[in-house]
Amino acid sequence: MLILGIETSCDETAAAVVKDGREMIASVVYTQIEKHKKWGGVIPEMASRFHLEVISQVIRECLEKANCNIETDIDAIAVTQGPGLTGSLLVGANAAKTLAWLYKKPIIPVNHLLGHIAANYIGTDIKPPLICLLVSGGHTQIIRVDSYTEIEVIGESVDDAAGEAFDKVARLMGLDYPGGPHLDKLAQEALAIEGALTHESAETCRKAPFCYEFKIPEVGALDFSFSGLKTGVLRLKEKIGEEKWQADKAMIAKAFQDTVAEFLFKKVAEASRITNYNNIIIAGGVAANSSVRKRFSDGFKAPEYQIYYPPLSLCTDNAAMIAAAAYHLEPNDLGFEVYSRLA
Ligand code: KG4
Ligand code: ZN
């Protein structure tokens, strides 16, 4: 079964063809990052306009790459229904509805979160039940995945998303948007400083004037909170002054991302304990972070745990994950509406 997926929930216009929910045939992602860069974040009205400009081209290019004729080869059309930016979602939904109507294909609206989870099924034999940590610019959620179609959000951020916190702290450091990957790179320079120290001097380092620590925020059960952590970094900047801030930036970046990694790990470990699910997947842009990966790989070891990270191209928003999720869902009629938030 070949499904054409369409995703436009935020700032990526994407189309993909996936076979039987597991095999990627083609995927095209057009990102608007460059266009939103100078504003330091996504501007919703602009995002929907950009989607509209490229959506036809992205779908056409994807079908060409897949060597597919929509009329004869595609069995169904899947599209992100929500959550996301309403105007952006509407562009994808209307494109999908038009194609479904024109070519008389079944249409399958897909929950974006179910999509992020399904990204892990592509090219693997991973199966639910599992725990998914979804950490991106828009989401920070722990999701209990009971089956291919049944999921429940069991923990989430009460304020900023994890990626948003990375972007805001990176901005304090004068790094470009989106700042997460730049901050990660900077933090790795600190590793070189730490790596040069012996074990004993690492202890000394912890007390050294260039060594920083942030407190893990206190928040209920499986939830997260990042705004206090971000403010903590801002207060530190004010306290130590510009010169020291510049000199110690790498160490501060490292301390910040280690704290985020520890925070995420602790909550997912607790979720695994509560649910008794030992298969863990991490999705979303922040899954690329080196401290996060290290903490999770060190903390969740086989044979007790299985941990999976999808390749980066499938971690961030794409349409292959939407087509993969749709394989397990029922078609809808053309009258469905998009939604910006989970009910
Ligand atoms: O999943 P994604 O591409 O888009 C959505 O938000 O849906 O995630 C983007 C977020 C941005 O906030 C970006 O700064 C962050 O993921 N990010 C990272 C890293 N790579 C991307 N954050 C920390 N470390 C990274 N290596
Ligand atoms: Zn997403």
Image: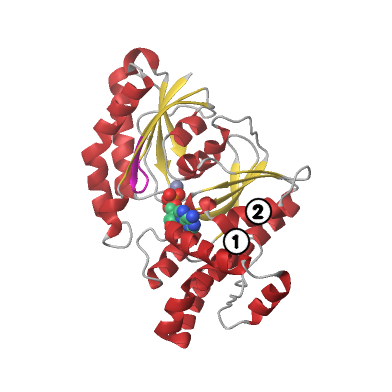
Q: Is residue 100 visible?
A: no
Residue beneath label 2, please?
296
**Residue 94: percent from the left, percent from the top?**
29, 35
* Residue displayed at 74% across by 45% down: 305
* Residue displayed at 55% across by 65% down: 257
Q: Is mark 1 within 8 Å of ligand 1?
A: no
Q: Is mark 2 within 8 Å of ligand 1?
A: no
Q: Which residues are magenta?
A: 8-14
**Residue 43: percent from the left, percent from the top?**
28, 57
Q: Identify whether 48 is placed above or below 80.
A: below
**Which SS class for mark 1?**
helix
Mark 2 is on which residue type? Phe
Contact? badges 1 and 2 (CB < 8 Å): yes
**Residue 77: percent from the left, percent from the top?**
39, 26
* Residue displayed at 43% across by 86% down: 241
Please tell me how crowded label 1 is: few (under 14), some (14-19), or many (20+) other residues with Cα within 10 Å.
Answer: many
Q: Which of disc 2 and disc 1 is earlier in sequence? A: 1
Q: Is residue 185 visible?
A: yes
Residue beneath label 1, please?
261
How much space separates mark 1 and mark 2, taking CA atoms?
Answer: 8 Å
**227 to the left or right of 46:** right
Furthest-top residue in this view: 72
Q: Which one is in front, 226 or 76?
A: 226
Q: Quadrant of residue 307?
A: top right
Mark 1 is on which residue type? Ala
**Residue 236: percent from the left, percent from the top?**
49, 82
Q: Identify whether 44 is placed above or below 112.
A: below
**Which SS class for mark 2?**
helix
Q: Quadrant of residue 180?
A: bottom left
**261 to the left or right of 13:** right
